[in-house]
Amino acid sequence: MPNSDLPAAEAVGASTSPSATQMEKEPAIAAASSPPVDEDTVMVEAGEVQAMVEATAPVAEVPSAQGQAEADNDMMVEIKQDKKSEIKLEDLFEGMDSDDDDDFLAAANPLNAPAPREPDTHDASFELLRIYYQRFFPWRYMFQWLNHSPVPTNDFKHREFSLWLHNDAVMRYQSYTTSDLFRKDVIRLMPRRIEIGPVYTADPRDRKTFRNSTAFQPMAKELCFDIDLTDYDDIRTCCDKANICNKCWKFTNMAIKVLDTALREDFGYQHILWVYSGRRGVHAWVCDKKARALGDQQRKAITGYFDVVTGGKQGGKKVNIRRPLHPHLSRSIDILKDHFQQDVLETQDPWQTAEKADALLQQIPDLGLREALRKKWDASPGRASTAKWADIDALAQTSASAALDPKDLLDAKQDIVLEHTYPRLDSAVSQKLNHLLKSPFVVHPGTGRICVPIDRGNLEGFDPLNVPTLQGLVTEIDAWAETEGAAAAMAAVEVSEGGGGGGGSSSQDVKHVQDWEKTSLKPYIEYFRSFVTALMKDEREVAVKREREEEGDVDVKVESLDF
Amino acid sequence: MNRIDVKRRNVLDHRKKQFADPSYKETQYPHRLNFYSTPPTADITLEQFEQWAIDRLRILAELEACSFRNKTPAETALHMKPLLDKYLPLDASSSGHSQLHAQRQKDHYSHFILRLAFASTEDLRRRFTRVETMLLRLRFQADDSRERAAFVRTLNLDWEPVSEDEKRALSPQLATTIGFGYGKRAQQVLDEDWCKVDWMRVPDLVEGRKVYVKAGKAYVPGREQQSMVLNAYTKRLEQALELTARALPRLDEDDRLTPILDHLSKNFITPDASYTGAGAAIEGAEMTARNMDNLSQHFPMCMTHLHRSLRRDAHLKHFGRLQYTLFLKGIGLNLEECLVFWRSAFNKVTDDTFNKEYRYNVRHVYGDVGGDSNRRGGGYSPYSCQKILTEHAPGPGEAHGCPYRHFSLENLTSLLRASGVTERAVLQGVKEDTDSQKFHMACNRVFEHLHRTEIKRAKDEGVMTAAQLETIVHPNEYFKRSYLLKNTMDNKQKHRGADVKMEG
Ligand SMILES: [Zn+2]
């Protein structure tokens, strides 16, 4: 009875009420560890809010890119004003969390980005989406990814999915016993967004039968990270808000390199999946068994470990770290310093304006040096940031007061490098075991782009503005049919429609070409497949090892546990 | 690892283990510190049972208050020292104190009694674990370093020591985590007693980047090993409390213990207090019926709400009248004025109705009528926060109770807004306090916010003693402090010595 939990929420009509925007940042917070019965209602409210937000900037029928961007800008302004003027009750009390909010600014069309190749790509319309779920979505690998084994286990069966429907209801606590049921339900309900939650101690659909909250608890989920370029607005000069371009995309590359390296070398994780969030950010899914089992306290700890650039959105971001530098930070600076030179100083030119240059001066520890720099920069307005950066060391030789400890200057410069390059994380996504996150391979409703995995080994080759789109895939498959010959195409379509549906779960051993293999989605799914294969292989080995351990030492430690 | 533990726990017959072996066996206490792994078995008297538990509870409640007030570890230690000496002394083995065994026995037993009292709900278990861990931390820090090391060795914490070779190899990385010196770092690293553990076991050290982390292992210097000890303690206590919770029903058989345990756990919700200055008007304050609107600016939210409801409806229901009358009595409104106050407030009823239905109750509260004992005792005492929080939860149409506990967030927020609390951070703090059931902390937070200017001035001028800035747990204390703070300059001397008395 997959329908029994469908909340009775209807799409809410157009409204630009400021209160609607209040929820903008908190769509999908899973319940606290003891879920109240009426949680779905909360979620429905989130859905309603989204309905309102989207109603201000319709997704499906937008007259022009320009009009769309204006609608979005209006909304942004409204949010800002509202935050200043008054505290709204729901803002305060409906969850302090925030989540990936890509979809909420869905209709923004990057003003300064190249125009979309097909004007309709952002139109995540119903029929295209159906084709996508039926023929392109990698069901089989998604199942294996979450199940960690070829036969369905509780890792999959007790996993929460939440489906965001087109009528703006959100169905929380969906779960499926097999990959095929998952696929069928999605095709029946056609959610425009699928989120993945934790694995619970019991089937999420049965949660209401557990009176005592300890019997129904989240017990495992990938350790997730969320990087969103809006958090870089104070240091990127090319774009702001929901907009991105290849210049500011570099910030995500820096973040990925730093996090990925630390997660592997420091924490010893190996299975880290990076996924494009469809518009202006990336998600990380750390899938190692040990990472999935982390509790909230440990998730909070690891988030704190990566918390370097702190400060609220209104106040400036500040780097506040101890000296001597922690090994993680000195290594991060090694990774980041070339990016700082190229992608920040040269490309972003962050201190071009007098105002920004002044902010930079505030971070220089010596008055004499500060004044000398100010004089020099006043004399040559528009001096490039690379030159300004070089000026600091050059003038330190001549103008700094004797009291300036070179060590202090070095510290200040390191802080500045970190401020402009170190990952900025949305910590709410990482801290809670029961936080939901948008699934890989869903279609971003605003951009029409597929949320594809990013190959850590080829970061520079990833172009967020050029990932496969819903519209594009359909065009590609048509083109393939024409060029590759009608016969081959017909055979493939038959198989995929009759059986496994794109994922290749068909029992037939026919080596046919999958639909996704005929499109630009191919390298992404292949990458995902190899990721999942490696994960499953490891999981088998871990399982065998644990069994041995369990048999070995049960008796030894019983006494020490009894108190 | 967690998973294995769960399995094992399930196969144990913990009840038998925990409550079996009733034969008398004198427990030995070789160490000052205790992980409380073994339940006590010797008999104690019912009086000891209760008194020891109350003494420990006092300590825990005060520790919790210290953490709510964000005291630093040093401030907490200073604040707690006299209390610990008085209620739960624990001397070092080296002290040669004659009462070592008795001290350690009381510590041991009181811990286990409170386990019984606080095992019943998840919330109580969580709080108990938290404050017990704070207590162990405090004692751990104060412990003689040799005795502490000896104690830690008995714990079997499964730490892997870092070899000399590895120390040397990782010297530059390890050096960064042990302080600021750039001098003899390599030597310092070698001198330090390092161990490595799964990073998950020292989340707080990882969170603050206080340890070097490599391949999932955290390298913990000797001085930070406290964190691991405490973590292990927390974990073991959490598990033990769950076992206790499951075993609790068996305790019902002993009906002498149930009321004591019940009272103890209630006391943990909010420390009870009696208001010592009841009935004495504050000098300089005009205690008249017509001045109540003016004085209501000094009322805590529970009384503000009663006052406003009364003004709005010209009526209050029974428990509202009772709670409010007692409060008014407590602030020093005399019976005569109080009757005037109620009469004029109930302006929709006739004299006749008022005299018949309400007058008597007010007089009774003041001890003007009623049985001998009521009259001798001067009527009832004003309600403490604990009483308001735990007795007679308000129903529909009733205005008594504690807004922080009994109001919806929405209503609480509008009440606070209407009383001048509009700052987001404060409202947020109140929400967090009430979410975690720290209602009296929410009230104190609001008090501190509304009086921030005066508190700062009073502190700066040294007018208020530290004790007078401690947690308020009585509405009348709230009023008195508020009034005096707003009139500090005139009253420098008059409010000394009116501290809240903890009843336990
Ligand atoms: Zn850009």
Image (cartoon, coloured by chain):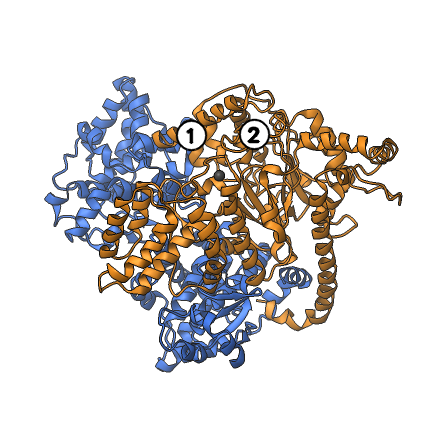
Asked if residue B367 is positioned above or below residue A395 in the image, the reply reads above
Q: What amino acid does circle 2 point to? A: Ala
- Residue A114 percent coordinates (x, y): 55, 32
Q: Where, quadrant-wise, is the C terminus of chain B in this rendering?
A: bottom left
Q: Which residue is mark 1?
A: A79
- Residue B355 percent coordinates (x, y): 27, 23
Please state if A493 lies on the left or on the right of B502 as rendered: right
Residue at the location (49% across, 50% down)? B123
The colour of chain B is blue
Q: Can marks 1 and 2 be said to lie on one chain? A: yes
- Residue B175 percent coordinates (x, y): 43, 72
Q: Count every numbered label the image shows and give the total.
A: 2
Mark 2 lies on a secondary structure that is loop
Residue count near mark 1 (Cα–Cα under 10 Å), binned few <14, some 14–19, many ≥20: some
Q: What amino acid does circle 1 point to? A: Ile
Q: Earlier in the sequence, mark 1 or mark 2?
A: 1
Which chain letter goes with mark 1? A
Image disc number at residue A115: 2
Q: Quadrant of residue B434?
A: top left
Disc 1 versus disc 2: distance between alpha carbons?
Answer: 27 Å
